[in-house]
Amino acid sequence: MKFIRYLVLALVVTSLFSLSAYSQKKTTSKRTKASSTKSTAAALPPLDVRAARVKVENQQVNITEFLKRLGPVAQAIEALDAEAATTKLKKESLDKNAADKQAVIAAIRNVREGLVKLESEFRVKAVLKKYLPTIQGISELAGQAETSAIAGKFVAANVPLRSVQQKLTDTLAAMPAAQL
C-alpha cells in the first residue's frame, strides 16, 4: 500500500513540474511576439519622411506625365515656328502658336513651383536633410527648362526635366519605403 502511495505521489509531482515547464514555454513565446511587434514599430520611419516620400512620388508622376505631353507639343510649336520663318502663315495659326507657347511656359512655371517647394522642404526639415544631396538641384533644373522655353527652345526644355525625373527616382531609392 505504501508503494502505491509513493507511486501516485511521484506521478503528481512530475505532472506538476511538467505543467510548470509547459506554462513557462507559452509565456516566453508571448514575449517574443510582443518584442517583435515593438521592433517593427521602431523600424517605421518618421511621419515627415513618409509624407515627403509621398510628395516625391507625386512629383515624379507629375513630371513623367508632363514630359509625355510636352514632347509632341514642343515639336509642333518648333515646327510651326520653322515653317513661319520660311513661308507666310495665317494670322490665326500664328496666334494659336503664340498662345500655345505661353501655355507651355506657364505649365513649366507651375511644375517649377512645386519642385521648389519640395526641395525647400528637404532643406528645412532636419529629418529630411540626409536625403537632400539626392534631390538637390531640381529647382535649378526646372529653372533651366523654363529659360529654354522662354527662349523658344521647347524641345530643349525636355532635357533638364528628364534630369529632374532621374533625381526624383534616385531620391525615392534612397528613402525608406513605408506606407503613410
Image (tube, rainbow, N blue to C red):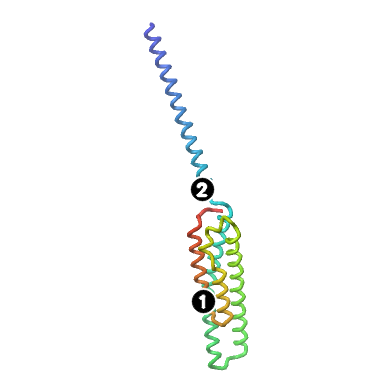
Q: Residue at x 53, y 93 (%)?
A: 86
Q: Residue at x 61, y 65 (%)?
A: 117
Give neighbour class at mark 2: few <14, some 14-19, many 20+ (Cα, 10 Å). few
The answer to which of 96 and 127 lies nearer the viewer is: 127
Q: Percent x, y for residue 159?
A: 50, 75
Q: Say which element carries label 1.
A: helix
Q: Would you name the residue on which mark 1 appears?
A: 71
Amino acid at the residue labelled 2:
Ala
Q: Residue at x 53, y 84 (%)?
A: 78
User: Farthest top residue?
Assistant: 1
Q: Percent x, y for residue 110?
A: 61, 71
Q: Say which element carries label 2.
A: helix
Q: Are marks 1 and 2 in contact (CB under 8 Å)?
A: no
Q: Would you name the residue on which mark 2 appears?
A: 43
> How far is mark 1 from mark 2, CA to CA?
42 Å
Q: Percent x, y for residue 137?
A: 54, 68
Please report whichever mark, 1 or 2, sits nearer to the chain's N-terminal start.
2
Tell me the number on the disc at residue 126. Answer: none
